[in-house]
Each structure stands twice: as C-alpha cells, then as structure tokens.
Amino acid sequence: MPRFAYSARDRAGKSTSAELEAPSRKDALRLLTARGLQIATVTELQAGPVCKAGKPGAKRAAKSSSRPAAQPPRRAERLPFLESLHDLTTSGLSAGEAVRLLSTRIKEPRLRTLCAGIWERISEGAPLSRAMGSFPEVFDSGTVNLIQAGEATGSLNGTLSRLIAHLVEQRELRSQLMSALAYPVFMVFVSGGVILFFLTFLLPRLQTLLSSLGGKMPTSTKLLIGASNFALSIWGIMAVVAVVVGISAFIGWRQTPAGRTQTDAWMLKLPLIGPFLVAQTVFSFSQTLSVLLENGITAAEALRMTEKQIGNQVHRAAFNTATGRVLEGEALSVALTRTGCFPDLVLDRLAIGENTGNVVPSLKSIAQAYQKIITGQLNFFTKVIAGVVLGGVFAFVGFIAFSIISAVFQVSASFKLGG
C-alpha cells in the first residue's frame, strides 16, 4: 500500500508532520480530514504496484487510457448544478456530500465532469466556494462570492435559493428576447429566399417568354428585369461581397473597446432600441444589486459586481463613476442622478428606499416592475418587426404581380393593334 508524507495543523493550531498508509491520495486526504487536521501538503513516498504487460492491471490501464476525454463544462452547466445542489442540501445533506453524490449520479457528461472536479477539490480540503472558483468558465466571481457569503453566514440554502431565482429570471428574459426575435428573423430569411428564387430562376424565364411574344414592356417590368440582371451579373455579386465584407468589418470594429462604446452610444439614441436598453440596464442593476445585498455582500463589493452585469458600455461607465461617488460617501440615488442614465421615477423609488432603510425591497420592486416593462417591449417589438417584414414582402410581391400583369396586358394590346 502506498505511503504518504504530510504536514498539517491540528485543532490547536500546532504544526505536525508524519506518514501514513492509504490506498490513494484521496483516501489519505479523507483520513487526515477525519482526524480534524488542516492539511498543508501531502506527498506520496511510494508509488502503487506497477502492472506488467499482460497482467489484468495493465489491461485495465490500457482500457482506461482509451476512454474519450472528459468534456469540459461550460456556463450552461451553472444553473443545473446549483439547482441539483440546492435540492440535496435542502434534504439534509451537507454541501460536500451533496457534490460527492452528484459526481456519481449525474449522467450528463459536462455536468458530471463539473461535479467530479468540484468534489475532487472539496475532498482535498477546499470549501465549496473555492472549489467552484476553480471553474471560472462556469461560475463568475459574483456567484462564487455569493456562495462564500452563504458559507460564512451559515445560510447556504437561502443563498442558493435566491441565486437560483435570480438566474432563472435572467434565463427567462433571454428566452423571451430570443422568442421575440425568432419569428421576424425567420420571416426575413424566408422572404429573402423567395425573392432570390424569383429573381434568379422565374424572372429570366418570364423575360424570355415576353421577349419571344414581342411588344413593348412597361416601365415596372423593365425595372424588375433590370434588377434581376444586376443580381445575376458580376456587379451584383461584387455588391453582395462588399456588403458582407462591410458587415464583417463593422462587427470586428464593434468587438474593440472603442467600437463597442461608440455603437452602444448610437443604439441609445434609436427610437425603440434606446428605451429598451435603458429598461434592461435598470432591470440588471436592480435585480443583481438586490440579490447581492440580500446575501450579505458588502455595498462596495456589490456595486462592483453589479457594474459587470450592465451590458451597455455607456451605462457601465456611468455606473462606475456613480460607484466611485458612493464609496466617497454620496447616496446611491444622488450618484445615479448625476449620470443621467436612469429614469427619474426609478431614482425616486431608490431614494425612498434609502431614506426608510429598505433599499433591498425597493430594488426588488423596481426589478419586478421593469421585468414587466421589458416583456411588454419585447411583445411590441415582435409585432412591429413582423409587421414591417410582412409589409415589405407584400409590397414586393405586389410590385412583381403588377409588373407581370402590366407586361401581359401590354403584349395583348400589341397583338390587337397588330391584328
């Protein structure tokens, strides 16, 4: 059996160093933790038995080495992990035991990898928050700090419950946004495909038919045929390439800090998009800050975390300035008033909450109100965009029908005159 040398501190804080035997390093760590020791280092002195070729151990090693690599977890695994952890901790299990059980029971590959990785760090003596912090691609600093605060105050279940509710609301908002955009985007692609099919396939054949019949074609038909010829020519292809290159360049520029700030400032000035972005900022600010303050995060740290949740760069810079003024002793409502980014009614409700000592309830009330506002705006956007797209499609189809019918009547008239 392997031997391990360790150094640790006992409950009295006294340093101790010794050796012990254990089947594996994990088992050694569990034994030391069970003795109440705070582990500093554990080093294996003697490796386990080496399996020679042809023995069953070698076959098992070869088989395990042929297994596919574990899939790395992503941000999408955060909410399922927290929900599963909350279900087990509310049933009476400790956080460590809950994670250990999840690491063996969960079948989904990425989530299983995440649970196994967190359990490995917990089994080495790390608290849950520090173990979660080892996966920054899944858990952001705000989530880790909330879990750390819940551990420190002994209210991990309540913290998990509030955090899950916060993440579920954000997921529902993103789902509403995607649902609102799905139908207009679908209509754009379908209508674009129909128009492209007509210009490149049907119209050339119609042009051949009309030309063979003779007669003078009306102006609308000439415009339609000219558009088709341009779309199929080298100039049309170059125009499409230029548009694609321009869009790609614009997207690349927007990814830069200066481009993101400039485009965010432009979007705030647009008639419908600007109010929607303001509502999103108010919702993110009020919901995130209320959750952080409710879970025991200090005001300074909560404001810094909230700043990271604001998507619009203009609003984020303004909030950063307001945070600096708050840390200097100014009231939050007064500091936000100076930014000019928040509606007056929101600032009034926040000021009332500060004066009455009910900041968190005021923030929750603002978040609930603006969640309804955003839902209404999304529904309105869906109707407006769908109406514009359908109107454009119907107008183009009507123009095509008018052009064809006019050409037919013109050719028929020329036949009568000729007869």
Image (cartoon, rainbow, N blue to C red):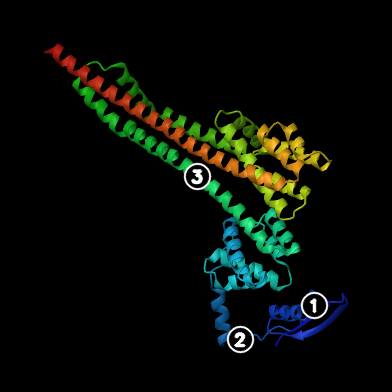
Q: Disc 3 versus disc 2: distance between alpha carbons? A: 57 Å
- Whether residue 72 is visible here, answered yes or no, is no
Task: Examine the rendered structure and indicate whether residue 308 appears above or below residue 270.
Answer: below
Name the side, left or right, on which 388 lies relative to 415.
Answer: right
Tell me what residue is drawn at x 42 percent, y 29 percent: 236
Looking at the image, tell me whether mark 3 or mark 2 is earlier in sequence order: 2
Q: At x 22% / y 26%, what residue is drawn? A: 209
The residue beneath circle 1 is 37
Give amino acid for label 2.
Lys
Residue at the disc numbered 2: 52
Which residue lies most toward the front here? 356
Return the residue at label 3. Answer: 178
Upstream in sequence: badge 1 or badge 2: 1
Residue 358: image location, x then y, percent? 72, 46
Seen from the viewer's position, the closer of residues 2 and 8 is 8
Per the model, the C-alpha gap separating discs 1 and 2 is 37 Å
